[in-house]
Image (tube, rainbow, N blue to C red):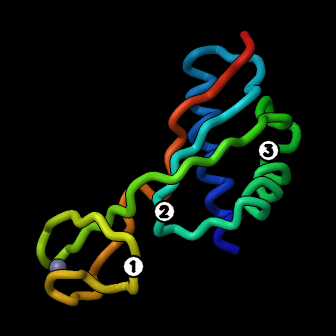
């Protein structure tokens, strides 16, 4: 389940950040997802609820925004912006490509 591991990644990132700024509770988080990632929002929110249980992020509301479809080709050593991605570099057709910034926490609202 892809969404489950993304939810774990998100939780990990926000708990670390919350510790730095000494937050008591995380109320809302904004997530920027690469539009090529194909996230099932419902599943992501559900997974997040499960992984965040008994943490300060337990009741956090999640907002998802989609960013540009950026990929990186290890063959060309270059980034490309795509609307559709079929697992290959648009320039050299290499399959050594990865989605950049799959999911990034762009903002969060906390209580101190
Ligand atoms: Zn390439």
The circle drawn on residue 15 is: none
For the image, the number of numbered tags is 3
Q: CA distance from mark 1 to mark 2?
A: 10 Å
> From the viewer's perspective, is residue 26 above or below residue 104?
above
Q: Is residue 66 left or right of residue 29?
A: left
Q: Position of residue 96 (x, y in %)?
A: 27, 82
Q: CA distance from mark 2 to mark 3?
A: 24 Å
Q: Is residue 100 left or right of residue 66?
A: left
Which quadrant holds the C terminus?
A: top right
- Judge by depth and name the residue closer to the eye, 2 or 35: 35
Earlier-in-chain disc, 1 versus 2: 2
The answer to whether mark 2 is within 8 Å of ligand 1 is no
Q: Which class describes the residues within 10 Å of circle 3: few (<14), some (14-19), or many (20+)?
A: some
Seen at 77% across and 22% down, the residue is 25
Secondary structure state at the residue bearing disc 2: loop
Secondary structure state at the residue bearing disc 1: loop
Mark 3 or 1: in front is 1
Image quarter for ligand 1 equals bottom left
Q: Position of residue 64 (x, y in %)?
A: 62, 48
Residue that mark 1 sits on: 85
In the picture as drawn, the residue positioned furthest to the left comes out as: 76
Q: Position of residue 71 (x, y in %)?
A: 31, 67
Seen at 86% across and 44% down, the residue is 53
Residue that mark 3 sits on: 52
Residue that mark 2 sits on: 35
Q: CA distance from mark 3 to mark 1?
A: 31 Å
């Amino acid at each position: 389940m892809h969404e489950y591991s993304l939810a774990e990644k998100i939780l990990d990132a926000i708990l670390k950040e919350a510790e730095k700024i000494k937050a008591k509770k995380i109320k809302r988080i904004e997530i920027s997802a690469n539009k090529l990632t194909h996230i099932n929002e419902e599943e992501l929110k559900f997974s997040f609820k499960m992984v965040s249980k008994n943490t300060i992020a337990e009741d956090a509301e999640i907002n998802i925004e989609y960013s540009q479809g950026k990929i990186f080709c290890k063959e060309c050593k270059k980034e490309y912006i795509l609307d559709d991605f079929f697992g290959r570099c648009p320039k050299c057709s290499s399959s050594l490509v990865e989605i950049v910034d799959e999911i990034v926490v762009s903002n969060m609202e906390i209580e101190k």
